[in-house]
Amino acid sequence: HVQLVESGGGLVQAGGSLRLSCAASERTLSSYSMGWFRQAPGKEREFVAAISGSGDSTYYADSEKARFTISRDTAKNTVYLHMNSLKPEDPAVYYCAASYRTSWLRMWSESQSMYNYWGQGTQVTVSS
């Protein structure tokens, strides 16, 4: 089965930027729709961003549209989450997820049940 491995997390100063990566174990993932979620301690996992299999469509949590950008590189079988202007409330474990669906709709993005595979997460800590 598909395995997802997140990387790029770490400590960053508030207002700084960070790029997270999600590498897939097999190239078939290149056609999957992908999503990023995050989970802070004691809180539910929440949707951050999603991208269609082709990369033509992207979707974001309303609160993050201005700061986060999701993209993908099919040649590297990797999906990225570019995070800008990080805020103290951003620290969390960030997870990538994959869906068999090549096309994607905004209404599916926030639903964790729409994703078939999940990575183990990468920690992001924002200092004040």
Image: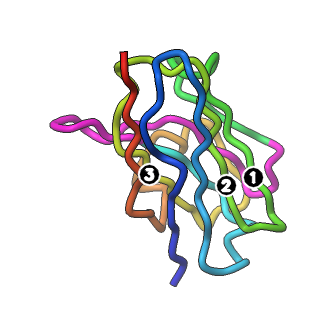
Question: Crowding near pointer 1: few (<14 within 10 Å), some, many (20+)?
Answer: many
Q: Which residue is located at x 57 percent, y 17 percent?
A: 85
Are the two marked residues, 3 and 1, in contact with CB atoms closer than 8 angstroms?
A: no
Which residue corresponds to mark 2?
A: 79
Q: CA distance from mark 3 to mark 1?
A: 15 Å
Most extreme residue toward the bottom, as rendered?
Answer: 1
Taking 2 as reference, is 56 above or below it? above
Q: Is residue 4 left or right of residue 124?
A: right
Q: CA distance from mark 3 to mark 2?
A: 11 Å
> Badge 1 is on which residue?
72
Residue at point 75%, 52% (across, down): 72
- Disc on the earlier residue, 1 or 2: 1
> What residue type is disc 1 on?
Arg
Q: Specify start and end residues of the magenta stretch as a single range.
A: 38-56
- In the figure, 26 relative to 113: above or below? below
Q: Does the stretch in magenta take in 48?
A: yes
Assess disc 2: are there few (<14), some (14-19) or many (≥20) residues with their C-alpha within 10 Å of its C-alpha. Answer: many
